[in-house]
Amino acid sequence: MKALLTSFISGVVFALGLGISGMTRPIKVIGFLDFFGNWDPSLALVMIGAICVYFVAYRYSRRMSAPMLAADFAVPPNRDPDTRLILGAAIFGAGWGLGGFCPGPAITSLASGATPVVVFVVAMAFGVYLHALTTHLGSLKTIAPAAVRPVTIDS
């Protein structure tokens, strides 16, 4: 129950931060991405602030023997970027630039009930489903038939 309550409160704080920073407003995000036009650098300050908080929290967590609300730390192994990561990042970036949303702010913005937000979230959910489907299909192994013996007819 404690972990669930902590997760809920963290989500509320995260959603409030997205709203206060302006990341739930596509025009703000698109202004940030418009380097050669009317560039709005304010989201860079939000990102720098988030990186600073993460940096301190990560360093602190490395000194802990165990997390407070879980059995183990879930730290991914350090791996080199692969094609799937690069392609996924490119699709994410294109969606962010075209739609003005990334997943967190889009879900937070659902509270507005605005049609473009709903369309974006539905399209995003379909993309997640499509990815899961194609990943599952790609992981299925073709089952080769058992050794087939040629049939010979004895006369």
Image (cartoon, rainbow, N blue to C red):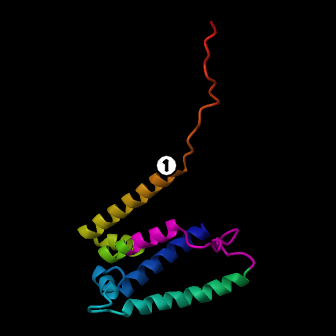
**Residue closest to the eye, 27 or 83:** 83
Relative to 150, say whether 88 is above or below: below
**Residue closest to the eye, 4 or 53:** 53
Relative to 33, say whether 4 is above or below: above
Query: Farthest left residue?
Result: 115
In the displayed structure image, the side of residue 8 where residue 44 appears, left or right: left
> Amino acid type of disc 1?
Leu
Disc 1 crowd, CA 10 A, few/some/many (<14, 14-19, 20+): few
Does residue 72 belong to the magenta stretch? yes
User: Which of the 4 image quarters holds residue 7?
Assistant: bottom right
Range shown magenta: 65-93
User: Which of the 4 image quarters holds residue 75?
Assistant: bottom right
* Location of residue 5 in the rendering, given as x and y in whole percent from the top left corner: 55, 71
**Residue closest to the eye, 5 or 98:** 98
Total marks placed: 1
Does residue 81 belong to the magenta stretch? yes
Can see residue 116? yes
- Disc 1 marks which residue? 137
* Location of residue 129 in the rendering, given as x and y in whole percent from the top left corner: 42, 56
The C terminus, quarter of image = top right
Q: Magenta residues: mostly which secondary structure?
A: loop
The structure residue drawn at horizontal position 34% and vertical position 87%, both measured from the top left corner, is 32
**Residue closest to the eye, 92 or 53:** 92
Q: Secondary structure at mark 1?
A: helix
Relative to 9, say whether 131 is above or below: above
* Location of residue 91 in the rendering, given as x and y in whole percent from the top left corner: 40, 69
The N terminus, quarter of image = bottom right
